[in-house]
Image: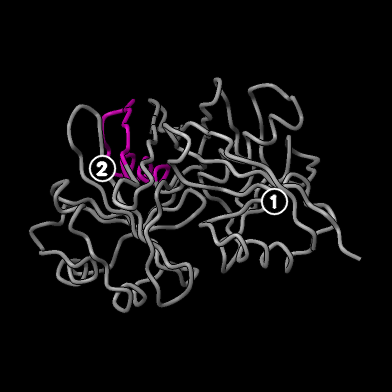
Amino acid sequence: MSAEYAYRIVNVFAEERLAGNPLAVFEDARGMDEGTMQALALQFNLSETSFLLPSERATAGVRIFTPANEMPFAGHPTLGSAFVVRALKNCGDALRLEMRAGIIPVRAAGDVFTLQANVAKTRPARLTREALANILGLAMADLGERPLWVNSGNEQLLVPLASPDAVARCQPDARLAQRHANESGMVKIYVWAETGDEQIVARFFFSKRPGSIEEDPGTGSACANLGGWMVAAKMPLPLVRTIYQGDRVGRPSRLRLNVDEAGNIFVSGRVIELGRGAVSV
């Protein structure tokens, strides 16, 4: 006997309706097993799909799946899920979401949602500049300083580049990148460059499945990790940056990064609901 599950489609980090990073949010995943969640994430084939569940410790529980695996934390599913939880529970603008990475606080102001990321952990990127340039399809002169692995819930390789032009020219080699996957065996590479006026242009490359490389339009976890990189680099605090991402894939995304004087990391973006539906499984 099949069961029906309602879902919503929202766009996160979107300044207009058909922009930002799309997300499917299942409103109530009780009764759904892990295999069904994974199969539905593959069915929707978005970068992530989230599933809302009850929580005794927070406003709601959230499980996040890519088409290939479950994620302990991801930024745009956090903000998009918070949008749906607020609408369903009428719980006000302060929420707490329980994820595998822990409890993530989220605040809202209208349709702009802000998450507070976990404290970021870093480790050296043990790659020569030549190897890193080859992975990205760039010259060594295009690389900036201090690439690092950063993890505020989702470990990624953060690579500062010398110019916005270098960001635009990145063409990662999937085979070479797979040799330097994160601890979960997945390729996750975030490249960026400062453009002035507290603005950054960025791109995020990842593997939906081993051996492939795709580009994400708006990556909140990478924005949070960028804050961790800036703390590790001992940049003056507090700081604010607006990140421009997704234009290269036709899905302009705008993310706001704020790191306060104590090094707490906040990521903000606008959430727009696009539609609703239901599936029977």
Percent position of residue 39, x then y: 67, 67
Identify the residue shown where x is 17% and y is 46%. 164
State the residue in front, 162 or 5. 5
Asked whether residue 224 is drawn in magenta, I would say yes
- 65 sits left or right of 266 in the view: right
Label 2: which secondary element: strand
Q: Is residue 122 above or below residue 88?
A: below
Pointer 1: residues within 10 angstroms few (<14), some, or many (20+)? many
Which residues make up the magenta segment? Answer: 223-244
Asked whether residue 232 is drawn in magenta, I would say yes
The amino acid type found where label 1 is placed reads Phe
Q: How many marks?
A: 2
State the residue in front, 119 or 218. 218
Name the quadrant of the N terminus.
bottom right
CB under 8 Å between discs 2 and 1? no
Label 1: which secondary element: strand
The amino acid type found where label 2 is placed reads Val
Identify the residue shown where x is 67% and y is 42%. 276
| Residue matched to label 2 | 201
Pointer 2: residues within 10 angstroms few (<14), some, or many (20+)? many
State the residue in front, 267 or 81. 81
Which quadrant of the view contains residue 238?
top left
Which quadrant of the view contains residue 156?
bottom left
Mark earlier in primary sequence (2, 1): 1
The tag on residue 51 is 1
Percent position of residue 243, x then y: 32, 37
Percent position of residue 125, x then y: 30, 63
Percent position of residue 17, x then y: 48, 35
Identify the residue shown where x is 56% and y is 38%. 79
- 10 sits left or right of 15 in the view: right
